[in-house]
Image (cartoon, rainbow, N blue to C red):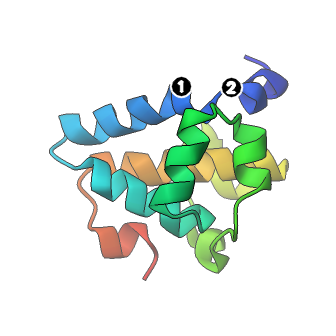
């Protein structure tokens, strides 16, 4: 799948998979939302609007109120790539979110996931 194709995917088409992955491992939708809020600065009202309007990933991150300043603390491998080594900013942000959801599904404490 090309990067351009990923960027144009609707966030709403992937969001249910994030929630399902978390719930399969005993975590909650609220925790998935908390991760999204922490990473992007969106709140629940904005997130719902973005889901309903089927906003693509590119717009989702481009219009994010504020990417958390601690994102540089997110390290490790996701989809075979070190997230901190991904050069394209948008792809790195998408992979940051993937990495955080993976950490949630693996049972990591929210304080550690949110780099507090």
The percent coordinates of residue 46 (x first, y second) are: 57, 56
- Residue at the spot of label 2: 9
**CA–CA distance between discs 1 and 2?**
7 Å
Could you tell me which secondary element the residue under label 1 belongs to? helix
Q: Answer few, some or many: residues within 10 Å of disc 2's Cα (few below 14, many 20 plus, some between 14 and 19).
A: some
The percent coordinates of residue 89 (x first, y second) are: 81, 53
In the rendered image, which quarter contains the N terminus? top right
Please tell me in which quadrant of the rendered image residue 79 appears.
top right
Name the side, left or right, on which 21 lies relative to 58.
Answer: left
Name the side, left or right, on which 24 lies relative to 104.
Answer: left
Which residue shows up at 70% across the image and 47% down it?
Answer: 60
Task: Out of 54 and 109, give the one closest to the viewer.
Answer: 54
Please tell me in which quadrant of the rendered image residue 24 appears.
top left
In the rendered image, which quarter contains the C terminus? bottom left
Q: Is residue 91 in sight in this rendering? A: no
Q: Cβ–Cβ below 8 Å for labels 1 and 2?
A: yes
Q: Answer few, some or many: residues within 10 Å of disc 1's Cα (few below 14, many 20 plus, some between 14 and 19).
A: few
The percent coordinates of residue 87 (x first, y second) are: 84, 51
Task: Out of 26 and 58, give the one closest to the viewer.
Answer: 58
Which residue shows up at 70% across the image and 60% down it?
Answer: 64
Task: Out of 76 and 45, give the one closest to the viewer.
Answer: 45
Could you tell me which secondary element the residue under label 2 belongs to? loop
Q: Is residue 114 in sight in this rendering? A: yes
Which residue shows up at 23% across the image and 49% down it?
Answer: 28
Q: Which mark is residue 97?
A: none
The percent coordinates of residue 44 (x first, y second) are: 45, 59
- Residue at the spot of label 1: 13
In the image, residue 38 above or below residue 49: below
Task: Out of 12 and 85, give the one closest to the viewer.
Answer: 12
Which residue shows up at 15% across the image and 45% down it?
Answer: 26
**Residue placed farthest to the left in the image?**
26
């Amino acid at each position: 799948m090309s990067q351009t194709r990923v960027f144009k995917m609707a966030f709403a088409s992937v969001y249910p998979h994030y929630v399902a992955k978390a719930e399969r491992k005993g975590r909650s939708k609220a925790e998935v939302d908390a991760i999204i809020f922490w990473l992007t600065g969106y709140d629940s009202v904005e997130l719902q609007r973005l889901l309903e309007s089927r906003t693509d990933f590119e717009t989702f991150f481009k219009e994010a109120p504020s990417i958390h300043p601690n994102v540089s603390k997110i390290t490790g491998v996701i989809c075979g790539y070190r997230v901190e080594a991904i050069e394209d900013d948008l792809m790195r942000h998408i992979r940051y979110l993937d990495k955080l959801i993976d950490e949630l599904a693996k049972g990591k404490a929210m304080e550690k996931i949110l780099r507090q």
